[in-house]
Image (tube, rainbow, N blue to C red):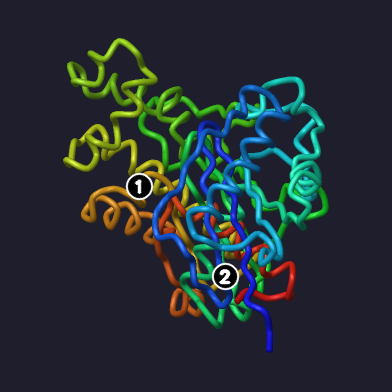
Amino acid sequence: MQTQWFVVGLDNGGNKNNATVLEPPGRFLVDSMVETPSRVQEGAPIAVQALVEAFDGILARTGVPRESIRAVGLDSPGPASAAGVISSRGSTNFSQPSWRNFDFRGTLEESLGLPVVYNNDGNAAAFYAHYSCFGSAAGLRSSISAIVGTGLGGGVVQSGHIVKGAAGFAGELGHVHIPMEGLLGEGQPVPACNCGFVGDVESVASLTAIETNLLPYWLTRFEGHDLGKVADVAKAAKLVRTYGEKGDPLARKIFEQQAIAIGRLFTIAGKFTDPDAYFVGGGVAESAPEFRDWFLGIVRDNTSLEEEQAGIATFALVPDLDMAGARGAALAAVESLHGTTP
C-alpha cells in the first residue's frame, strides 16, 4: 500500500510569501491565499528563514505531517538562473548585497532538509494556467503566458514541461521586440524599457509602462482629465485600471495599446512554439468581467495566426492569479519527482 504524500508550494514575493499544499493527484488543501511576510528587503538569510516559517505554518494549518512531504516548490521574481541562483546584479525585489549570486534554492533546500524545485514566478503561474486548462491532457499540450505586473513576466510550456532554457532566462517575454507601427498614437514617442531596450513588450504592457510611457502621453490628448490632477504619477498609474473598468476613454486607450502589444507578442510566439493556448495574467485577470473580456478580445484580435492555428487555439485568462505562483510551484515539484504533472 502506497503511503500518502504531499508537496508544498512556496511563492516568494517582494512583500509576502504565499504557501499551499498539494496532494497528488491535483488536490490543493487550501483554497485561499495563506500569506506571511517575505522580509526579502532584510537580506537573504532572513528571507530564507521567513520561508521556513511559511512552510511550517502551512503544515500546521493543514494538519499535514512533515514526514509526508516529498518535495517543495519555490518560485520568486527574477532574474535568477534555472538552478535558483539570484542574478549577480540583484533586482528590485533582491536589492540587498547578500542576494547577489545567492543560491536561493540550495539554501532553502539545506534549511528544510527536503528537495526544493525552483522556478521564476512567471513560469510558475504559466504552469498553473496550463495545468488548470488541460488537466490530465497537460502533458500533451503546449501554451504561452504573458503576465502583466510591474513588468511583464511570462512562461512557455511545451508538451507539459516548463521551458527554462540553458541559463534559466527562457520565457522572459517582456523583452521581446514588437512592431510599433500602428500601435502608437500620433506623436507618441517610441517607449523605452528599464532593461535598456526600446520598443519591447514590457515598455508598453506593464504598470511601469503606464507610469513612464503611456499615461504621460495620453494626458496630453485628454487635457483636464482627473488623473492629470494626481500629483504623484506613480499613484495615478495605479488608478488607471479602475478608470478602465468604468469605461473611461483615456484609460481604455492605454489598455488597448497594452492588449495590442500582447497580441503582437503572441503572433511572434505562434511562429516559434505554435501553442495550443495563449494565457493572459495580471491585474486585468482580476478585474470586472466586461473589462477583462474586452481586453482579452483585443489581444485575440491582434494575434495573427494561420487559419489552421486559429481554429484550435485557446485564449484565456490565468485563473486564481493570486494563488497561481504557489500552486504552479507545487505542480512543478510533482513533475520533478515523476516526470509529469499529477
Residue designated by label 2: 275
Q: Is residue 164 left or right of residue 273?
A: right
**Callout 2: SS:** loop
Residue at 76 percent across and 34 percent down: it is 87
Q: Is residue 94 left or right of residue 174?
A: right
Q: Residues within 10 Å of mark 2 (few under 14, many from 20)?
A: many
Q: Is residue 245 left or right of residue 23?
A: left
Disc 2 marks a residue whose amino acid type is Pro
Q: Position of residue 257 (x, y in %)?
A: 38, 41
Disc 1 marks a residue whose amino acid type is Val
Q: Position of residue 202 (x, y in %)?
A: 53, 38
Residue at 66 percent across and 67 percent down: it is 68
- Is 4 placed above or below 291 here? below
Looking at this view, name the residue that lies furthest to the top.
Answer: 231
Residue at 47 percent across and 29 percent down: it is 208
**Looking at the image, do the residues carrying marks 2 and 1 touch, with CB atoms under 8 Å apart?**
no
